[in-house]
Amino acid sequence: MTNKTILVVAGSDSSGGAGLEADQKVIAAHGCYAMTATTALTAQNTMGIDDIHQIPPEFTRKQIDAVFRDIPPSIVKTGMLGSAATIKMLSQALADYKVERLVLDPVMVATTGAQLLPAKAVDELRTLLLPLTFVLTPNIPEAKLLLTNSGEAVGDVRCVEDLEHLARQLRALGPQWVLVKGGHAPFKKDGTAATSPEERELVIDVLLGPSGNVTRIESPYVDSKNTHGTGCSLAAAIAANLAKELETVDAVHAACRYVEAGIRTAPGYGKGHGPLNHFHSTYMLPFAPGKFVEWLLSRPDVAPVWHRFINHPFVLALGNSELPLESFKNYLVQDYLYLVHFARANALASYKAKNIRDIAAGAKIVQHIHTEMKLHIDYCKSFGIEKEEIEATEEHQACTAYTRYVLDIGQSEDWLGLQVSLAPCLLGYGAIAKMLHADSRTKIEGNPYWPWILNYVADDYVQAVQTGCELMERNAVLHSPSRIEELVKVFIHATKMEIGFWEMFPSA
């Protein structure tokens, strides 16, 4: 199993758009597990940093040690380190734990322009950490700062070749891979530097690897103020992709696309440089796994319809034995005719299923329906109604409308849509019988409908309901929130059809 664990050593951003907070969002959005060692606390928002409180390096080291003792990370990603002492501590920790994959984001200046790393600490970062780095991710100002006092000449970025030159100079300092981010120097489409805002058409990031090969990652220039934490987010995305065992070039390319989309879909929070949309490529289901049915029945748009169904006057009249016998007899006949199509629909569900487990579950429900239909025949005989008479009876329009709706869903929609259209019947009869069976007002002695109630609280029907629920639960988590909303509408409509079925038979 892939070890998708990442330790982030960085500062905290109280506004949530950068630092540890952003990193954890990015890592979670990529399906990985984030752990943290805090180097500094900041009082900041989208407009700037009010104050920084440095965490003693000794305590940050204790956090690192605690993580490695319990859940050794596959990747270490750094952000704001804040001081020379913290850098020295971290370099020792990386050596002690023989960390092979360090993604180093050399955070020195915030998007707002605030200085985050003292000048005297830059030398320590360059000499102590760069040789231990797997992927280095500086922007252009950070790249120039890292090269200051390194003996390398640093010029302006006027073309893509200048970015590549910066990458080569930085790689000579020790990192295996260098990604120089070009966001601070957007280009025209011909690859030359833009000299006015109107000419900003292209952002080019340059990735240089151990073999010396250069990969250019081009993105359309996005004119946006919502760029708070882009560097943190990009490095965190690279770390997550590496933890998921992507090749380095692919990991970086995917991370660049992730950040581009995050800027494009940014929520627009704050009065200054706003945060990205870190969860643009993920969605959260509105229910917990295994709780789809519970969530469905409790929804504000479902609950009133469901209440009308299971508390229909026809149902209550079954419990108090006041339902006219002729209504019940007519119900039995129409319900038998309904079950014919209900069985067809479940057989169709088995056909539409994609795995043997769901196919077998559908077949199991069909087998139960067959048993239920035989009980219907026996029940009808007790009222003087023979099977031939049942089968010769014309379907009521409400019965036809309901069953054909279900079959139409089965033909035109996916497997889960069909299961949801069948659910009001399957779940409803179990809920109704359970309610009536437990209600002290339900008449037992002399109630001709008591055997009907017992039929739907019997173990075989309870098992059928459980099977149907498990089918939906296993598959509901595989669908998007928008599809779930469509399924809710199917369920509501099918429940209303169930209510229409009760309406065929006078309850008083």
Image (cartoon, rainbow, N blue to C red):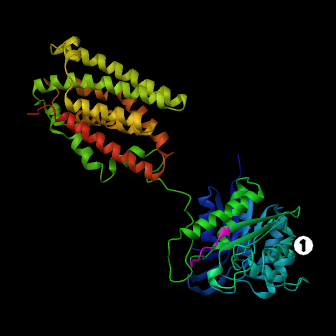
Name the residue rendered at 58%, 83% in the picture: 43
Q: What residue did someone put label 1 on?
A: 172
Work out whether residue 212 or residue 4 is closer to the camera in this orientation and state it. 212
Residue ranking furthest to the front: 190
Residue ranking furthest to the left: 508
**Dominant secondary structure of the residues highlighted in magenta in the image:** loop
Residue 350 relative to residue 48: left or right: left
Work out whether residue 96 or residue 18 is closer to the camera in this orientation and state it. 18
Q: Can residue 10 be seen in the rendering of this structure?
A: yes
Q: Can residue 448 be seen in the rendering of this structure?
A: no
In the image, the segment drawn in magenta is: 219-225
Q: Where is residue 32 in the image (x, y as percent from the top left)?
A: 64, 56
Name the residue rendered at 52%, 29% in the picture: 357
Q: Residues within 10 Å of mark 1 (few under 14, many from 20)?
A: few
Residue 444 relative to residue 370: left or right: left
Tell me: residue 245, above or below residue 135: above
Quarter residue 152 falls in: bottom right
Q: Position of residue 126 (x, y in %)?
A: 84, 78
Q: Is mark 1 on a helix, strand or loop?
A: loop
Does the magenta run of residues contain 25? no
Q: Where is residue 251 in the image (x, y as percent from the top left)?
A: 72, 59
What amino acid is at disc 1? Ala
Does the magenta run of residues contain 221? yes
Residue 320 relative to residue 71: left or right: left
Tell me: residue 499, above or below residue 184: above
Q: Position of residue 313 (x, y in %)?
A: 15, 38
Tell me: residue 84, above or below residue 90: below
Quarter residue 499 falls in: top left
